[in-house]
């Protein structure tokens, strides 16, 4: 038997507190609150503050900035899953008259629409949303800067358009839709568009002196779907668990995997940093692990949500200063500390409930030319094909019900795998998008393109 999930070990908890304390002290922020999630629940909360007495706990609200975009993306994926739109649809099909309607919904989600990063002046984060009452005020006279789909270019107005799309198709304000479709089902009672006590105040800390100044608090109006929300470390911990596991009341695990999959071409600098972007989620390769989530900032606040699905660990970091602590690094470090100190205990191996004869006969070694591959039937009913040594093309394959399989990822995504049989019914070779896989290198009995030399293998001489 496997013991029940326990809270973190004392040494791990101290290491987490130390990392948070260093971040608050060296980052010179009035307060910093954090949480760690494992096994679908928060297993640690920590905080540091410059104010004597009771510090911020998991119920104190902070502004979370662009983490709001992930919530908006969930609403859009829900519309897709209900059949109300396709991610390849041009925006114009559902929200006409914006002036940017040729871009697709997928491009808006992935920041590949080519839209400008910001709305026209004055700076929208420090001015009232009432200055931009219409979508045309958000987009301005020159909303498109790059050809759609050609590059990743982060766009706040793009998510404003997605929020307007949600409102159009649902027939209700964006925040009302968010509350009924996401916040209430997931129990996020302390996440809201406007601050609710207890909440932190936002501060700017002087870069060359230990003094502070309060930042203005603005309602973002039309820009709300890009960065309006307030939340707590407790609520974001529950949201992180949802993003990792799914919840059929809100969004399936399959759709969330789609959100976590890179969807935008990476710039050279992004490649160097190991960074990419999915559908409403940032993706980063750091410390040998794949991390997904999102960061956020607004004047007076910084926020970060980081998830390692493979390690089953997530972290939330919130602070109330305009700049200072590198909280994306803090979030990644909190995940790393737990993953390394208390590595995930894998589920017990279990055999398939049944093994069908057809895929079972395909299991084992195969050769593409002289390259050795292995094909396995996995416990989830999929086929896995990959090189037996080194790196190379690999993929899982889903059965199509007609004796063929479709690739799910990488080079073979969407490609068809089929077994080609001899007259006696035995498998002669595998055909994968015209690639021929044989049971031995260049099998002379198989239909190898270009045929096999009749003299076979030989040495030098």
Image (tube, rainbow, N blue to C red):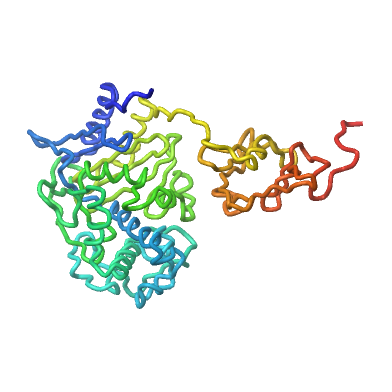
Residue 206 in view in this figure: no
Q: Name the image quarter holding the C terminus.
A: top right
- Residue at 19%, 63% (x, y): give it: 127
- Residue at 23%, 70% (x, y): give it: 132
Q: Quadrant of residue 437?
A: top right
Q: Residue furthest left?
A: 53
Q: Quadrant of residue 106?
A: bottom left
Residue 370 in view in this figure: yes
Vertical order, 55 against 270 (above or below): above
Residue 73 in the image: state x and y as whole percent.
35, 57
Front residue of this view, candidates 186 and 240: 186
Vertical order, 143 against 400 (above or below): below
Vertical order, 140 against 118 (above or below): below
Q: In which quarter of the image is residue 240?
A: top left
How many callouts does the rendering have? Answer: 0
- Residue at 71%, 52% (x, y): give it: 434
Residue 357 in the image: state x and y as whole percent.
64, 40
- Residue at 67%, 49% (x, y): give it: 418
In screen coordinates, is 189 left or right of 391? Answer: left
In screen coordinates, is 327 left or right of 460? Answer: left
Front residue of this view, candidates 461 and 432: 432
Q: Name the image quarter holding the N terminus.
A: top left
Residue 32 in the image: state x and y as whole percent.
20, 39
In screen coordinates, is 171 left or right of 89? Answer: left
Residue 415 in the image: state x and y as whole percent.
61, 53
């Amino acid at each position: 038997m496997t013991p029940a999930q326990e809270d973190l070990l004392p040494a791990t908890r101290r290491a987490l507190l130390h990392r948070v304390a260093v971040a608050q002290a060296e980052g010179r922020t009035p307060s910093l609150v954090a949480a760690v999630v494992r096994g679908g629940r928060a297993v640690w909360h920590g905080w540091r503050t410059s104010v004597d007495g009771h510090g911020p706990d998991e119920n104190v609200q902070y502004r979370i900035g662009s983490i709001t975009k992930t919530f908006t993306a969930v609403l859009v994926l829900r519309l897709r899953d209900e059949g109300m739109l396709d991610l390849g649809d041009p925006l114009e099909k559902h929200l006409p008259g914006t002036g940017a309607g040729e871009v697709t919904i997928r491009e808006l989600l992935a920041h590949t629409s080519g839209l400008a990063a910001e709305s026209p002046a004055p700076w929208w984060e420090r001015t009232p949303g009432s200055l931009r009452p219409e979508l045309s005020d958000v987009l301005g006279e020159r909303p498109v800067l790059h050809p759609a789909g050609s590059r990743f270019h982060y766009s706040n107005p793009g998510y404003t358009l997605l929020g307007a799309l949600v409102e159009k198709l649902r027939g209700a304000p964006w925040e009302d839709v968010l509350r009924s479709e996401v916040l209430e089902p997931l129990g996020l009672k302390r996440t809201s568009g406007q601050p609710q006590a207890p909440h932190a105040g936002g501060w700017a800390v002087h870069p060359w002196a230990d003094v502070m100044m309060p930042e203005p608090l603005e309602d973002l109006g039309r820009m709300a779907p890009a960065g309006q929300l307030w939340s707590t470390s407790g609520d974001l911990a529950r949201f992180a668990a949802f993003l990792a596991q799914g919840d059929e009341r809100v969004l399936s695990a399959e759709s969330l995997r789609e959100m976590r999959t890179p969807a935008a071409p990476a710039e050279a600098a992004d490649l160097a940093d190991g960074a990419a972007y999915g559908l409403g989620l940032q993706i980063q390769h750091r410390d040998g692990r794949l991390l997904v989530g999102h960061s956020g900032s607004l004047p007076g606040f910084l926020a970060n949500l980081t998830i390692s699905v493979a390690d089953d660990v997530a972290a939330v970091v919130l602070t109330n200063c305009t700049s200072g602590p590198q909280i994306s690094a803090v979030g990644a470090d909190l995940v790393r500390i737990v993953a390394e100190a208390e590595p995930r205990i894998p589920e017990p191996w279990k055999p398939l409930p049944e093994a069908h004869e057809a895929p079972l006969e395909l299991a084992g070694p195969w050769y593409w030319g002289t390259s050795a591959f292995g094909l396995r039937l996995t416990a989830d009913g999929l086929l896995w094909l990959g090189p037996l040594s080194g790196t190379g093309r690999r993929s899982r394959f889903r059965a199509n019900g007609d004796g063929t399989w479709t690739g799910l990822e990488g080079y073979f995504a969407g490609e068809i795998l089929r077994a080609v049989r001899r007259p006696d019914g035995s498998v002669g070779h595998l055909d994968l998008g015209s690639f021929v896989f044989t049971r031995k290198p260049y099998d002379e009995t198989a239909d190898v393109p270009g045929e096999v030399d009749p003299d076979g293998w030989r040495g030098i001489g």
